[in-house]
Image (spheres, rainbow, N blue to C red):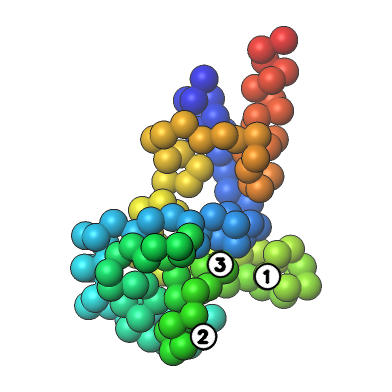
Amino acid sequence: MEFLFRDSFVCRRCGRCCREYAGRFSLPRSQVLEWREKVFDSRFGRYPAIKFVSMDYTIQGVDGIFFHPETGEHLDFCPFLKCDETGGGVIGGVCSCLIYSDRPLGCRRYPFTGEFVDLSKTVCPVVRDIRSKLKKLRR
Protein backbone atom coordinates (compact mmCIF):
# COMPACT_ATOMS: atom_id res chain seq x y z
CA MET A 1 0.00 0.00 0.00
CA GLU A 2 2.87 2.41 0.70
CA PHE A 3 3.80 2.52 -3.00
CA LEU A 4 0.30 3.84 -3.78
CA PHE A 5 0.80 6.54 -1.21
CA ARG A 6 4.36 7.37 -2.28
CA ASP A 7 3.49 7.48 -5.99
CA SER A 8 0.47 9.72 -5.32
CA PHE A 9 2.26 12.26 -3.17
CA VAL A 10 2.64 15.71 -4.79
CA CYS A 11 3.55 18.47 -2.36
CA ARG A 12 1.20 21.48 -2.35
CA ARG A 13 3.90 23.73 -0.87
CA CYS A 14 1.63 24.91 1.93
CA GLY A 15 4.42 25.03 4.55
CA ARG A 16 2.47 23.19 7.25
CA CYS A 17 5.12 20.48 7.64
CA CYS A 18 7.80 23.16 8.08
CA ARG A 19 5.77 24.79 10.83
CA GLU A 20 4.66 21.62 12.60
CA TYR A 21 7.45 19.09 12.09
CA ALA A 22 10.68 20.70 10.93
CA GLY A 23 11.66 21.75 14.42
CA ARG A 24 11.22 18.17 15.61
CA PHE A 25 13.39 16.44 13.05
CA SER A 26 16.82 15.41 14.12
CA LEU A 27 19.84 16.54 12.20
CA PRO A 28 22.35 13.70 11.76
CA ARG A 29 25.82 14.45 13.09
CA SER A 30 27.23 14.05 9.55
CA GLN A 31 24.89 16.77 8.30
CA VAL A 32 25.77 19.07 11.20
CA LEU A 33 29.42 18.66 10.24
CA GLU A 34 28.59 19.56 6.61
CA TRP A 35 26.71 22.65 7.80
CA ARG A 36 29.81 23.90 9.62
CA GLU A 37 31.20 25.02 6.25
CA LYS A 38 28.02 26.61 4.83
CA VAL A 39 26.22 29.94 5.00
CA PHE A 40 22.42 29.97 4.63
CA ASP A 41 19.76 32.55 3.90
CA SER A 42 16.94 32.49 6.45
CA ARG A 43 14.02 34.60 7.56
CA PHE A 44 16.50 36.32 9.89
CA GLY A 45 19.05 37.10 7.18
CA ARG A 46 22.23 35.35 6.03
CA TYR A 47 24.22 33.44 8.68
CA PRO A 48 26.68 30.58 9.02
CA ALA A 49 24.48 27.48 8.96
CA ILE A 50 25.91 26.10 12.17
CA LYS A 51 24.44 29.05 14.10
CA PHE A 52 20.97 27.54 13.59
CA VAL A 53 21.76 24.25 15.37
CA SER A 54 23.21 23.15 18.68
CA MET A 55 26.80 21.97 18.49
CA ASP A 56 26.19 19.31 21.14
CA TYR A 57 23.63 17.71 18.76
CA THR A 58 21.10 16.99 21.50
CA ILE A 59 19.87 19.25 24.24
CA GLN A 60 17.93 17.67 27.08
CA GLY A 61 14.38 19.01 27.31
CA VAL A 62 14.40 20.72 23.90
CA ASP A 63 12.17 19.23 21.23
CA GLY A 64 13.70 20.58 18.05
CA ILE A 65 16.83 21.40 16.18
CA PHE A 66 16.58 25.03 15.15
CA PHE A 67 17.77 28.03 17.16
CA HIS A 68 17.83 31.76 16.49
CA PRO A 69 21.25 32.57 14.98
CA GLU A 70 21.84 35.59 17.23
CA THR A 71 19.97 34.96 20.49
CA GLY A 72 20.24 31.16 20.60
CA GLU A 73 16.54 30.99 21.44
CA HIS A 74 14.81 27.75 20.39
CA LEU A 75 12.65 28.29 17.28
CA ASP A 76 9.13 26.90 16.94
CA PHE A 77 9.40 26.38 13.19
CA CYS A 78 11.92 26.23 10.41
CA PRO A 79 13.97 29.40 9.86
CA PHE A 80 14.38 28.47 6.19
CA LEU A 81 10.69 28.45 5.30
CA LYS A 82 9.77 31.17 2.81
CA CYS A 83 6.17 31.78 1.76
CA ASP A 84 4.69 34.37 -0.54
CA GLU A 85 2.05 36.69 0.83
CA THR A 86 -0.87 35.59 -1.37
CA GLY A 87 -2.40 33.73 1.55
CA GLY A 88 -1.92 36.48 4.07
CA GLY A 89 1.15 35.16 5.85
CA VAL A 90 3.31 32.12 6.26
CA ILE A 91 0.48 29.62 5.91
CA GLY A 92 -1.80 30.13 2.94
CA GLY A 93 0.68 31.21 0.30
CA VAL A 94 3.02 29.12 -1.81
CA CYS A 95 6.02 28.13 0.29
CA SER A 96 9.54 27.03 -0.48
CA CYS A 97 12.69 26.02 1.35
CA LEU A 98 15.59 28.47 1.26
CA ILE A 99 18.05 25.59 1.76
CA TYR A 100 16.29 22.93 -0.32
CA SER A 101 19.47 21.18 -1.50
CA ASP A 102 20.89 21.21 2.06
CA ARG A 103 17.68 20.58 4.03
CA PRO A 104 17.74 18.16 6.97
CA LEU A 105 17.33 14.46 6.29
CA GLY A 106 13.94 14.39 8.05
CA CYS A 107 12.70 17.10 5.70
CA ARG A 108 13.98 15.20 2.66
CA ARG A 109 12.09 12.08 3.70
CA TYR A 110 8.88 13.68 4.92
CA PRO A 111 6.33 12.13 5.08
CA PHE A 112 8.17 8.89 4.23
CA THR A 113 10.44 8.45 7.20
CA GLY A 114 11.05 4.72 6.75
CA GLU A 115 9.45 4.16 10.12
CA PHE A 116 5.79 3.79 11.03
CA VAL A 117 4.17 7.20 11.19
CA ASP A 118 0.70 7.78 12.58
CA LEU A 119 -0.78 9.54 9.58
CA SER A 120 -4.08 10.13 11.38
CA LYS A 121 -2.43 13.05 13.19
CA THR A 122 -0.77 14.67 10.20
CA VAL A 123 -1.14 18.31 9.29
CA CYS A 124 -0.32 17.60 5.65
CA PRO A 125 -3.39 18.05 3.42
CA VAL A 126 -1.93 15.74 0.74
CA VAL A 127 -1.41 12.93 3.24
CA ARG A 128 -4.97 13.40 4.52
CA ASP A 129 -6.38 13.27 0.96
CA ILE A 130 -4.40 10.14 0.05
CA ARG A 131 -5.30 8.50 3.35
CA SER A 132 -8.97 9.15 2.58
CA LYS A 133 -8.59 7.62 -0.90
CA LEU A 134 -6.87 4.54 0.54
CA LYS A 135 -9.74 4.07 3.02
CA LYS A 136 -12.18 4.10 0.09
CA LEU A 137 -10.08 1.48 -1.75
CA ARG A 138 -10.23 -0.81 1.27
CA ARG A 139 -14.04 -0.79 1.28
Mark 1 or mark 3: whose residue is earlier in sequence: 3
Most foreground residue, 11 or 57: 57
Q: How far apart are marks 1 and 2 (CA)?
A: 14 Å
Q: What residue type is labelled 3?
A: Phe
Residue 129 higher or lower than 54, as above or below: above
Q: For this view, does 92 lie left or right of residue 4? A: right
**Mark 2 Cα-neighbour bin, 10 Å: few <14, some 14–19, many ≥20:** few
Q: What residue type is labelled 1?
A: Val
Left or right of 104? Residue 42 is right
Q: Does residue 36 appear in the picture of this structure?
A: yes
Q: In this view, does 139 lie above or below 15?
A: above
The percent position of residue 27, horizontal first and vertical second, equals 34, 59
The image quarter containing residue 33 is: bottom left
Residue 98 visible in the shown view: no
The residue that disc 2 covers is 44
Where 72 sits versus 93, above or below?
below
Q: Residue furthest top?
A: 139
Mark 1, residue position: 90
- Res. 28 image quadrant: bottom left
Q: Nearer the viewer, mark 1 or mark 3?
A: 3
In space, the residues marked 1 and 3 are separated at their CA atoms by 11 Å
Q: Residue at x 63, y 70 (%)?
A: 83
Residue at left offset 21%, top offset 60%: 30
Q: Do the residues labelled 1 and 2 touch (CB within 8 Å)?
A: no
User: Disc 3 marks which residue?
Assistant: 77
Question: Could you tell me which residue is drawn at 51 percent across and 85 percent down?
Answer: 44
Q: Quadrant of residue 25?
A: bottom left
Q: Is mark 2 on a helix, strand or loop?
A: loop
Q: Earlier in the sequence, mark 1 or mark 2?
A: 2
Which part of the image, by quadrant, shows the C terminus? top right
